[in-house]
Image (spheres, grey):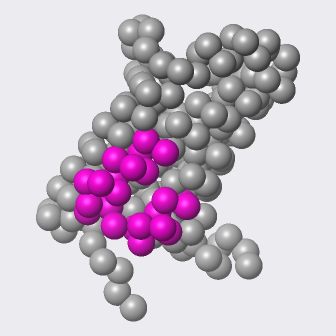
Amino acid sequence: MRIDKYFSLNEIALMSICGAMVFVMKIIFKIPVHIPGHSGIFWVIPLIVGVSIVKKPGAGIYIGLISGLLSSFFGIGALHLFDIFKFVGVGLATDVCSVLFAYRYDSIAVGVITGAVANIVKMVINYSLQLFVGVQPFFIIVGIGISSFTHIIFGGLGGLISVLIIRRLTRAGVIGEKEG
């Protein structure tokens, strides 16, 4: 099935904008707090909001692909070209959570879980890629401990903010249930 038959033009435009926003959030909110995963509070928002509006499997992967391509092209991470794998993995994790929870992003628990899972998947893929390019396993194992906790916390907070935004957009009538 072709992508233009599965997603409407409006959905493709929305997902592309959300993918670009994930990239922009990673660039703009580079706050030097030296806490691993802190940017997850920001970049999971456009990802979850986009997936919750489109409500189709593959939306997260598409958003992740766009943000991964932008990140790889502009080289914002230490792994440059491999950044695409991180963001596609994040999109896949978001899609899996969305399907498992039936796109119930009006629930705070679903938003927090999805945000935390997305941020932790990004961390796991990042460490896996570092192993692949030759970073010593000792340094990676040392970094995983506290890093996994902070990734879960910040990703969950980003998911919480996403749910609050989705609720406001729904109440305002900007987004809602699809008809037909």
Q: Which residues are magenta?
A: 95-117
Residue 10 magenta-drawn? no
User: Between 69 and 36, which is closer to the camera in this rendering?
Assistant: 36
Q: Position of residue 172 (x, y in %)?
A: 15, 62
Q: Main secondary structure of the magenta part?
A: helix
Q: Position of residue 93 (x, y in %)?
A: 57, 52
In percent of the image, x 49 and y 45: which residue is there? 117
User: Between 19 and 94, which is closer to the camera in this rendering?
Assistant: 94
Q: For this view, does 103 lie left or right of residue 135?
A: left
Q: Is residue 36 above or below residue 92?
A: above
| Observer able to see residue 50 | yes
Q: Position of residue 159 (x, y in %)?
A: 34, 45
Q: Position of residue 134 (x, y in %)?
A: 85, 17
In percent of the image, x 54 and y 60: which residue is there? 95
Residue 170 figure quarter: bottom left
Q: For this view, does 107 lie left or right of residue 16?
A: left
Q: In the rendered picture of this protein, how many numbered marks are placed on residues? A: 0
| Observer able to see residue 42 | no
